[in-house]
Structures are given as structure tokens and as C-alpha cells.
Amino acid sequence: MDYDVVVAGGGPVGLMVACELRLGGARVAVLERLTEVNPTVKGGAITTPGAEALYRRGMLPALAELQRQALDRFRAFIREQNSEDGGEGTGQGLGIVGHFAGIMLRADLVDRTEPGLGDTGPAAEIAFVAQQDIERLLGARAAELGVDVRRGVKLTGFDADDEAVTVRTGHGVLRAGWLVGCDGGRSTVRKLAGFGFPGTEPEITCHQAVVEMAGAEDLKIGWTATDTGVYAYGPMPGRVVTVEFEGPPADRDAPVTAEDLQARLRRVSGVDITITEVRTATRFTDHARQVTDYRKGRVLLAGDAAHVHSAFGSQGLSLGVGDAMNLGWKLAAVIAGRAPEGLLDTYTAERHPVGARVLDWTRSQVAAMRPDPRSRALREIVGDLAGTVAGTTYLTARLNGGGVRYGLPGGHPLTGRNTPDLELTDGSRLADHLHGGRALLLDLTDDPELRTLAAGYAGRVDTLTTGCPSRPELAAVLVRPDGFTAWAADAAANTPTPAAGLAEALEEWFGVPAGAVTPG
């Protein structure tokens, strides 16, 4: 084999998968058809689960700096707009945590005690980071870990059998044990492998661009619904979005011209702007599709290759990073012989429902954006709910990806859930101990039986004996490499010992302990 895994696609999801595989010891090559990061305007935000994944791998300081720079630009943009309209303000700006169908969600109305909003530690402060910046950050991380990233190399075909995958490119042939398709919504890997891709047809045409224009002082900042559609302006100078309900574009690949953008923005906004230059532009629709299974033999999919949907709510990037975190450690464990191949069956079982929910949430936003009377009535009701603490908290938590629970065995409330970023006795936090991509057993009551059970998993499961003052009821927590709780016990649980069930959880997720004799 040339590599253990070939990853097709070098965007954030492909790079994240590659980094996770390298942390698990796999030899990885990433094939990316572009020679540099695509400058086309894309997502300008990341939701908390994606930020938390990067935080758990030690990248929080870099994310925080990128956000600081972006917020500085946004504040300058707000000041400029306020000065142009006489200081009256132009609508929506800072103090917003996101939007549902262009209905802005105010930060001061969010109840941070909601699960997934108040227990993620400093990652909850990260949101305003552009996709291109995250791709550059992960590219640097991949280089540090020794991932072979081949830019300007496109996968053109492959053959897969029970033993390996032979990948063809314009530069030669590679042979690997596995192929992971992270090559976007029009995935070549998905098409060639024959994955089913059911879903709903598009009904809108959206344009997103960064332009030079005159007359922008009359545009409202943020998202605005009109009689002809929806438009957005900001959060940086010249960034505009138009949403029109005229069906999908006749030719999605046709160049986006200044004349076309100008006509669409005038039609939707009612403002007589003049676009003089297009710096970057793209168009997209709201088709929502998802493969029925994320794996076919030795070929797996992640990110947009596995599911596509509209960009409303900025959920796609974090959804793809979540796929990468879930898949990476599992595939690496199978390659290294630390776990049976059946572990990969849990990838689709856990991630498919998460993707399906995101698809439904993007569909629901389109329904609330339509300009017809019924949809506008719905929009008024949702807008009223978004003016309450309960409504804003619910919408924010769901758009933020909170509340995910995998169906893992065990009755503890934490089992199957994203583990809270616990603050420990020594002042460290849970995420500080997950940088290496291994599982972690937190022994919070200095229990030698716990440590004895974990001793056979050295190199697979780190053990930390400490305390957690904010959660004194917890006796122990077994955290998977992706940050989800595999097992937990309370100090006062009605079990013979706090360690009950730990041996089974360790074997289920991390194989048999070293030195164990297997039947047969």
C-alpha cells in the first residue's frame, strides 16, 4: 500500500479527517484539485460544535485570533455605515448570535444553561471565523502532523475490492486501504461509487458576492425580507446575498456578472444600487440530499459529499467537521488493529440522523422565507417566538447543533452526549486533555479499580485522576476521542461499584485489553 487512506478533497472536512487519521497513526494522502485555497466567498461563521472540535485539538488560540480580526473588520463596517446614514443605525449588527430564515437571534435572549450552549467552555465564544481561514488553519495543522497534501491533483477514478482501493489521478495511481470522499456536493467519489443520494429538489436561486457598489447606504445591514424575496448586506463591506423564489438557475455554472447581480439586488431590495466591480461571487440553491449509508465497503463519505443543503444558518461546516471527528478515530483504530471493522458501522448510525436533522432545518428556513402570504404569516409567528427567551434559546440551540445524543448503551444522562468541557481541580479543562486524539478516562474519585480496568488500554485511553468541583456527583467519565461520552458513573449511583459497565464500554469502543485471551 502507498497509504492507509486516500482522502479526496482538501477543504476543511478533508483536512480534518486527515488530521484525525494521522493522530491515530494512519498514513494519509489528501488529493485536492485546486492549487490554493478557493477565494470564492463562502461561509463566514462556524457553529459551536465545529469550534469545539478544533478547541479539543489545541487550535482555540488561533481561532480566537482569527475571530478578533474578523470582528475588528465588522466593527469598522458598522461605524462606516452609521456615519453614512447620519448615525441613525442601519439595523442589525453586534449582539446577534445567528439567524433563522433571516430572522435575527439576539444574544441577550439566549439562556446559556440550555444543554449545548452553556457547557462547551470557551468554544462557545467562537463563531465569527470564515471557512477559508479555517481551511488554512487545518492545512497548517495537517503539515505539522505529516499529512501528504497534494494540491493540483484530482481524483479521476478508482477501483475498490475487499482488500484495497486503487485511486487514479492525472498524475498517476495510488493504492490505499481506504478511500474517504470529502470532495463536496458534486462529489466524484460519491458518483463513481454509486451511493444513493435521495432528497428534495431546489426551489430558490441564491447569489452571494463581495462587490464594489454605489448606493449601498440605503441597504439595511443583516437579513431583510421583502415582497420579492430576501437579501442580506454585511458583515463586511460589499458582501451581499440575494434569495429569489423563481426556481433553480438554468445554468448553475454560468459566470456571475455585475449586471446580473445588480439587477437581482435591485429587484429584491428595492434600492437603486450600482455594482461597479465583482470581487468574488457564487450562486447556490436549496436542494437537500443525503446518502442513505455513509459507507460502501472501503469507500466512505464525509461532509458535503454525504449531504447537501442550503447555507442558511451556517450549519454545514460544523456538520462536516463533526463527521470528520466521528470517522477519523474509528477508521484509524480499525487500520491499526485496535478495533474490529464493525466499529465503522457506528459512523452512519451516529452521523446520518444528525445530517438529516440539519437538512430539515434548512428546508424549514426556506419555507419561512417564501414571499407568499402563508409563508409570511408563518414568518411573523416565528419572529414573535424569536423575540422571547424560550424561542431564541430553542432556535439558537438547534441551529448551533446542540442536543445531539448518540444511541449508546448505558443509563447515565451523559452517555451518548457531547461531554461538557469540565473544569478540573488543577484549573485545566477537559479539552486540554484531548489534544492527542486519544480517549480519556476521568477518574474523579481516586478509584484504583477504574485505573486497573483502563491499564490494559495504554496508548488507546489516557487516564487522569483529578477532581471536578462543579460536578461533585460525577465519579468517572469515559470520553471518546471525538469528545462524546462512552460511559459515565455517579459517586452515589445504585450500582455495586462506580466501575460497573466500564469494562464493557472499553471493549466495545477500544477493543480487547492488552494481554487478553480472545476465544477461539
Image (cartoon, rainbow, N blue to C red):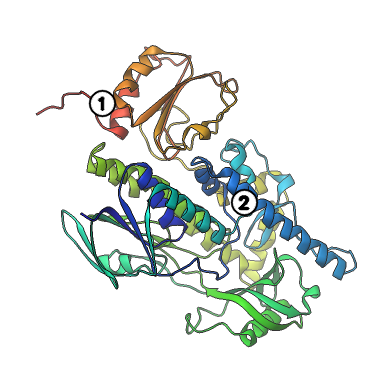
The residue most toward the right is: 86
Residue 29 place in picture, x, y as percent: 33, 57
Quadrant position of the N terminus in the picture? bottom left
- Given residues 256 and 57, the one toward you in this image is 57
419 relative position to 454: left or right: right
Residue 321 place in picture, x, y as percent: 46, 51
Residue 354 place in picture, x, y as percent: 44, 50
Distance in Å between CA atoms under marks 2 and 1: 40 Å
Q: Can residue 354 be seen in this view?
A: no
Residue at screen point 50% across, 78% down = 248
Residue at screen point 43% across, 52% down = 143
Residue at screen point 32% across, 19% down = 453
Q: What element carries label 2?
A: loop
Please, what is the three-letter code of the amino acid marked with disc 2?
A: Ala
Circle 1 is placed at which residue position?
A: 513
- Given residues 323 and 425, the one toward you in this image is 425
Residue 419 place in picture, x, y as percent: 49, 34
Circle 2 is placed at which residue position?
A: 127
Which circle marks residue 85 in the picture?
none
Q: What element carries label 1?
A: loop
Quadrant position of the C terminus in the picture? top left
- Given residues 101 and 126, the one toward you in this image is 126
